[in-house]
Image (spheres, helix red, strand yellow):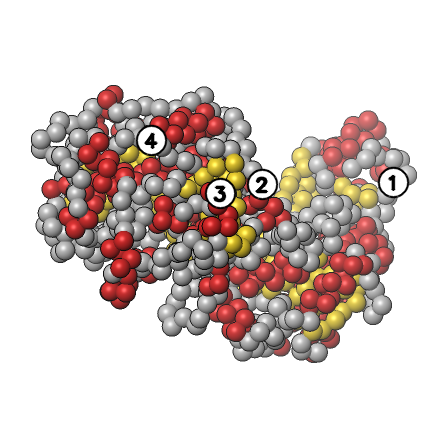
Amino acid sequence: MDPLELNQVLAFKPTLRVERMDAGVVFLIGERERFVVSGACAAEVAALVDGRRTVDEILRAAAGRCSEPEALYTLSRLAAHGYLVPATPELPSESAAFWHGVGLDGKAAAEALSRTPVSVLAVGEAALAGWMTEALEQAGVRIDGEAAVQVVVVDDPLRPELASINRRALREGARWFLIEPAGVQPLLGPAFEPGAGPCWDCLAFWLRQNRPVEELVRRRRGHEGHIAPPRAATEASVRTACGLGASAIARALARQDTSSPHALSARVLALDLATFQLTAHAVVRRPQCPACGDPARMAAVGERPIELHPIEKAHFEDGGYRRQNPRRTYERYQHLVSPITGAVTHLVPMPGRDTELRAVYASGYLVCPREGVPITNVFDKVCAGKGRSADQARVSALCEALERYSGVYQGDEARVRGSKDELGAAALALGDLLNFSEAQYRERARLNARAADRRQWVPEPLDAGTRIDWTPAWSLSKRERRYVPLAYCYAEAPAESGAAFCGPCSNGVAAGTCLEEAVLQALLELVERDAAAVWWYNRLARPAIALDGFGDPYFEALQADYARLGWAVWVLDLTHDLGIPTCVALAHEAREDRFTLGFGCHLDPRLAVQRSLTELNQLFHPGGARRAPWDLERLQGRAHLFPSPDLPRVAAERLPRLGGADLRADIEQCLGRLDGAGLELVAVDKTRPDIGLPVVQVIVPGLRHFWPRFGPGRLYRVPCALGWLPRPLEEGELNPVPLFV
C-alpha cells in the first residue's frame, strides 16, 4: 500500500472481522486468516477505523489516548501488513470481501468487469447458453451479445465447429473461453489468448491424444463428426460447473495485472463430481501447431546437423552423468503429466515393486494405431523408471514415457522418399541395423507364426531398389548427412513408409536435459545391449565383480534386502572389446528356481554396477508368477548365469574408468573407441518442439541388440577376439532362447 494521506478513508480489509477483547487486544478474524493487534494505543487506533473516518479524523479522535506520531505509526504498520485498505463504500460488503479473499482489489475488479463485457455462445446443446449467462451475471460479468470476448459453452470440447471459431479468433486476435459444464467430469477452460498461449487446435491435439479409441473411430470415419460418450448430467451438476466456470472467468477478467497467469491460463480445470476434487491440467502450446504455430518445426529439428557443446557434468550420482539433479528435471517437465491433456497419463510408484530401498516408478502414454482395428488393448503403453532414490526413479519413468511418446509417428517428421540405390552411401543399410541372418529371413514365416511378441517378428527383406521413407540423421563420426528408414525410428509409421521391412527400434533412444546428455545415455545403452547379446547368445562364462571393493553401502544394503526375501544377488562383468564398463546383475531364488536380471553400462564402473542393480530392482517382482525374463524350460544350460568358478572375481580398481571434463568430452572418448572398432555413430534428433525434452536415437550400425538377431558380425567375432571362445559358434549353436527385457 502507498504511504498514507491525511484525507484518505481507511477500512479493515473486507475479509477481516474486528473484535476488541479488552483495552489492549484486538483480534482480526477472517475465513482463512486470523491476527492479533496488541498494545493500548494500537487497540484504540484499530477501534477507530470504521470505513468512514479519514486518517486525519482518526488521528484527532485518538489524540487524548495516544500521541499523533504513535497513532500514525500504528496506522502505517497495519496498512503495511495488509490489514488496512482504502475504503470502498460503493461495493456491497460481501462482494468486496470475495474479491479481496481471492487476492484482487474489489473496486478495481468491479471496474474491470464493467469495462470488459462478454458474449455467450452455445455449441451443441442450446440450453447451456442460458445457464452459463445466468452464472456469469451472478459472478459480476456484464453480458453483451456483440462483445468481442466470447464464452463458448459446449457439450464436447472436440466439436468440429470449434475449429472455425478458433481460426476467426486467431485472425482477429480475439480472446475466448471454453467451458464444458456437462458430464461427470466437467472441464473448465482454457482461456484462449492469441499470441500468449495455446489455441483450440493445441487443446484438441492433447485431448485426442488421451482419447485414442475415440480418435481411432474418428479416423476410420474420415475425420467427420465427433465421437463422445453418452451425456451424463443433472441440472444441479451443470449449474455447479457453470458457476465455477463463471467465477474463474470473472477472476480472469478482473485482474489488474493482465500479464500474470490466472486459473484458466493455458490449463483446464477438471471438476470430478464422483470425488468432488478439482484438478488443474496444463494445455501446452504446440510450436508446430498448424493453426497457431509453424507446422514445419518438427521437420526442421530432424534436418538440422547435430552440434555438441561442452556441457558441465553437475550431477554424478543416481542416473549417471547429468546436467542437473533429478528433482529439478522433474519440476521442469511435470506439467506434461495428465490423463486429460498430457503426453504422459500417469506417474506413480509401481505397486508391488517400489520400496524405500528399491525405488521403482510406473508411467504411461497412449497411442492410437494408424493401421487396422485392434482386437486387444494396444492403446495403453506402460513405462517404468528406476533409481537409487525415489526422485531418480520418478524422473526416470517420466523421461522414459516422454522418450517413447516422442518416438510415435505424428506425420510432421522430416522424411525423404527414395531407395537405398537412389540415396547412396548416405542411407544406412537396413541389414546393418537389424542384423538378421539369411536363415532367419528364409524361416521368417515359421518364426513369425510362433512368435507371441511382435518384436520377435522377422520382417520382409528390403531390396536396395525399393522406395521407402527415410528420416534424416547425422553422423557424429563423419560429420555428414545420413538417412535411416522412417519405420525404424518411429512407431506407428504408415504401412506405405516401409513398415513391412522393419519395425520401430527403441534400442539407443534416450532423453536428457540437453542433447549431449541424451546422446551419451543412448550410446551407453547401445554398448550395454551389444555386450549383453554377446554374453547371452554365446552363453559365455563371465567373472563376478567384487561389490565390496566399491565401499558403497547401497550395494551391501540391497544384497541384504534380497537375501531377506530369499534371493541371492551377484553381478557379472560383461565389459568387452569397446572397453566401456558393462555388467549384468542377476538374482536367483533357489526354493522356486526363479531368476531376474538387470543390465548396466557407464564410463564410471561404480555407476555401471549401480545401474545394473537398479534395473534389477525394476524387473524384480517378488510376488509375480513369472519364473524368469526368458523361457527357463527351453534354456539349455545355465552356467553362464552364475559367476564362473574358473575366473577370479574382478576387483573394482581393475575395471576401466573413463570420462572427460564434460559431457561432450565423454562422448568424444566413446567415439574414439567406436572408431577403433570400425564403427560409426549416427544420431536422429527426435525432440518434439511441444515437449521440449531433448530425445535422440543413437545408431551404431553393427552393434547388436539383445533381441535374437543372428546375422554375421560382432556376435560371432568378439568372443574369439577376446579369447573367451576358441572359435566362433555356428548359428545353430547359439542360445536359441530369446532375451526380451
Label 3: how many Cα within 10 Å (few below 14, some 14–19, many 20+): some
Q: Residue at x 21, y 56 (%)?
A: 626
Nearer the camera: disc 2 or disc 3: 3
Q: In this rendering, does residue 469 appear at all?
A: yes
Callout 3 amino acid: Ala
Q: Position of residue 345 (x, y in %)?
A: 47, 56
Provide the residue designation for mark 4.
Answer: 677
Provide the residue designation for mark 3.
Answer: 426
Q: Which mark is residue 8?
A: 1
Callout 4 amino acid: Ala
Label 2: how many Cα within 10 Å (few below 14, some 14–19, many 20+): some
Nearer the camera: disc 3 or disc 1: 3
Marks 3 and 1, how far apart at CA: 78 Å
Marks 4 and 2, how far apart at CA: 28 Å
In the image, farthest residue toward the right = 7
Q: Which mark is residue 304?
A: 2
Disc nearer the start of the sequence (2/1):
1
The kind of secondary structure element at disc 1 is loop
63 vs 642, nearest the viewer: 642
